[in-house]
Image: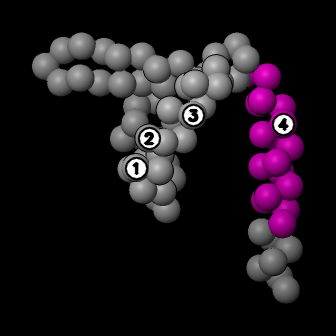
Amino acid sequence: MRTNELRKSIPQITERMLLRHLREMTDAGILERHQERGLALRVRYSLTPYGMTLVPVLKVLCTWGRGHLKHERSA
């Protein structure tokens, strides 16, 4: 995804915080940063094979989060 796409998908995050987290995840080997040159510099991020190992864990966390939100709304 491009940086702007990521920022739009997480409305509560500031650009500075998003860029900090992207840099940390790139440094940790979770993400790859791809620069596309053209009229305007475009940057895309993708999961590395190492980052893909987090997908099952994230799916479980998302499932838990959805259930937790439903529980809080009914309380």
Determine the CA span between mark 2 and mark 1: 5 Å
Answer yes or no: do the residues labelled 2 and 1 have beta carbons within 8 Å?
Answer: yes
Q: Secondary structure at mark 3?
A: helix
Determine the CA span between mark 2 and mark 4: 23 Å
Sequence-wise, the earlier of marks 3 and 4 is 3
Q: Secondary structure at mark 4?
A: helix
Majority SS type along the magenta span:
helix
Sequence-wise, the earlier of marks 3 and 2 is 2
State the image quarter where residue 41 is shown: top left
Magenta region includes residue 55: yes
Q: Give percent across and percent down for residue 43.
A: 36, 25
Q: Give percent across and percent down for residue 69.
A: 77, 69
Residue that badge 2 annotates: 19
Residue that badge 3 annotates: 24
Residue that badge 1 annotates: 16
Q: Is residue 8 visible?
A: no
Determine the CA span between mark 1 and mark 4: 26 Å
Residue drawn at x 53%, y 18% is: 32
Sequence-wise, the earlier of marks 1 and 4 is 1
Residue drawn at x 77%, y 29% is: 54
Q: Can you say whether 51 is above or below 74 in the image?
A: above
In this rendering, which labeled residue sits more in front, label 2 or label 4? 2
Q: Amino acid at mark 2?
A: Leu
Residue segment shown in magenta: 52-68
Residue that badge 4 annotates: 57
Q: Amino acid at mark 4?
A: Val
Residue drawn at x 81%, y 77% is: 72
Q: Is residue 33 left or right of residue 63?
A: left
Please count the marks in the image.
Answer: 4
